[in-house]
């Protein structure tokens, strides 16, 4: 008999619940639990009591505070150690905190933190620059302490395209109905195209509900196909019929969303994203461009890395003050050592305490004419990996 599913009504997550996690933990050492508690206390003081009311469900701090595994707790403690260090040094810390507490923390606040951490480890001091309307506005000023040289960083996250975001949100809405309406039945199908008309989408949702009701009443497979989707549900006694339906419609036994391409090089080069970010840094300043990107786009790059590098280097040529650009993403995977590519480019893969892997590609501008010592350049590259 299938189980009746209902959406869970979750408690409002807050600081008291985080402290409850700490008190209930039976796995971590007393020292780590104390560090965890102190780290949470620091974040509560810095982010404020109302943080959870405004942060949004995908805020990275929220994800970290919900983590109770040893690696996750260690990462949180290290994050707070970095914030403490940035707070007591001349970094313009309030600018950073304003970005971390915003709903755009994934785009700005946390990438800022990661850049700061990596460069501090390699002998740079960090200063977060305020945005001044009507002026060129790089995001971060790095000072190479051994030489006194300055490098200005412009960071811009390559977000989901609007088309991909809309498709994903629609898939999520359909998927919620399949999961939470009625009984939990095996399902298969494919979304064929984006449903632009919300009224038509609502009709599709009603069709999905009727199919699940039909399976419950008839104890047999129920299916539907049109130009928008093909979908089928079955009870436990109709799995063979569901597999036959999958073979007929050439789908797997799960509901698949629209096939999505992550070929974003055109967005960076063809639409002038590199140009837009490069001109934020004054021509008299040495600049470095950072682009956090989607993992699937990074994998697409890997299929033809030389062609992608050629496109990026061509886009960088007019900007003689730009050292190069850095693309990076994170995923769970096997660790590898960094290695140099031709012409000073760099590709690396490193891991943190939680086993999250960071892929990094640095593309060096062959037309860079700024003044930067070999020592500073070497430490910049160390910070990237």
Image (cartoon, grey):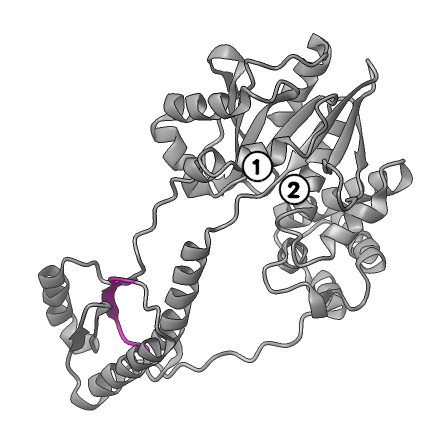
Q: Where does the image place residue 141, in percent across and percent down from the top left?
A: 77, 31
Q: Which residue is farthest front?
A: 134
Q: Where does the image place residue 17, in percent across and percent down from the top left?
A: 71, 69
Quarter of the N terminus within the rendering: bottom left
Answer above or below: position of 364 versus 101.
above
Answer above or below: position of 108 versus 257.
above
Quarter of the C terminus within the rendering: top right
**Can you tell which mark lies on residue 25?**
none
Residue for badge 2: 111
Between tags 1 and 2, which lies in front?
A: 1
Residue for badge 1: 291
Q: Quadrant of residue 128?
A: top right
- At 21% from the left and 58% from the top, the residue drawn is 252
The answer to whether residue 191 is left or right of residue 282 is: left
Answer above or below: position of 132 versus 13.
above
Q: Provide the residue span drawn in magenta.
A: 184-193
Q: Where does the image place residue 125, in percent across and percent down from the top left?
A: 81, 28
Q: Is residue 31 visible?
A: no
Q: Where does the image place residue 116, in percent across and percent down from the top left?
A: 73, 35
């Amino acid at each position: 008999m299938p189980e009746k599913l209902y959406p869970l009504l979750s408690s409002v997550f807050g600081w008291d619940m985080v402290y409850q996690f700490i008190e209930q933990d039976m796995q971590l050492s007393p020292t780590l639990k104390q560090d965890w508690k102190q780290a949470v206390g620091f974040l509560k003081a810095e982010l404020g009591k109302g943080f959870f009311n405004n942060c949004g469900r995908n805020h990275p701090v929220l994800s970290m505070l919900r983590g109770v595994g040893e690696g996750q707790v260690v990462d949180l403690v290290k994050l707070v150690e970095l914030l403490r260090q940035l707070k007591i040094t001349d970094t313009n810390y309030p600018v950073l905190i304003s970005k971390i507490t915003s709903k755009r923390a994934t785009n700005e606040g946390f990438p800022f933190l990661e850049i700061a951490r990596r460069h501090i480890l390699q002998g740079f001091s960090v200063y977060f620059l305020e945005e001044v309307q009507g002026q060129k506005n790089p995001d971060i000023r790095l000072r190479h302490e051994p030489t006194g040289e300055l490098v200005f960083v412009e960071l811009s996250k390559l977000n989901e395209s609007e088309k991909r975001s809309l498709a994903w949100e629609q898939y999520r809405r359909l998927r919620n109905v399949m999961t939470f309406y009625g009984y939990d039945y095996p399902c298969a199908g494919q979304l064929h195209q984006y449903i632009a008309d919300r009224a038509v989408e609502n009709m599709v949702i009603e069709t999905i509900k009727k199919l699940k009701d039909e399976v419950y009443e008839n104890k047999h497979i129920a299916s539907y196909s049109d130009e928008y989707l093909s979908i089928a549900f079955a009870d436990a006694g109709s799995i063979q019929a569901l597999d036959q339906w999958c073979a007929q419609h050439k789908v797997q036994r799960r509901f698949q969303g629209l096939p999505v391409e992550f070929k974003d090089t055109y967005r960076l080069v063809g639409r002038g994203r590199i140009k837009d970010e490069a001109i934020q840094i004054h021509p008299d300043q040495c600049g470095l461009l950072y682009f956090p990107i989607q993992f699937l786009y990074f994998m697409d790059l890997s299929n033809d890395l030389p062609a992608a590098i050629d496109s990026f280097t061509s886009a960088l040529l007019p900007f003689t003050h730009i050292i190069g650009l850095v693309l990076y993403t994170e995923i769970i995977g096997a660790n590898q050592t960094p290695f140099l590519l031709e012409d000073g480019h760099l590709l690396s893969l490193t891991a943190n305490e939680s086993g999250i892997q960071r892929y990094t590609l640095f593309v060096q501008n062959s037309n860079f004419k700024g003044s930067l010592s070999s020592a500073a350049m070497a430490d910049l590259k160390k910070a990237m990996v």
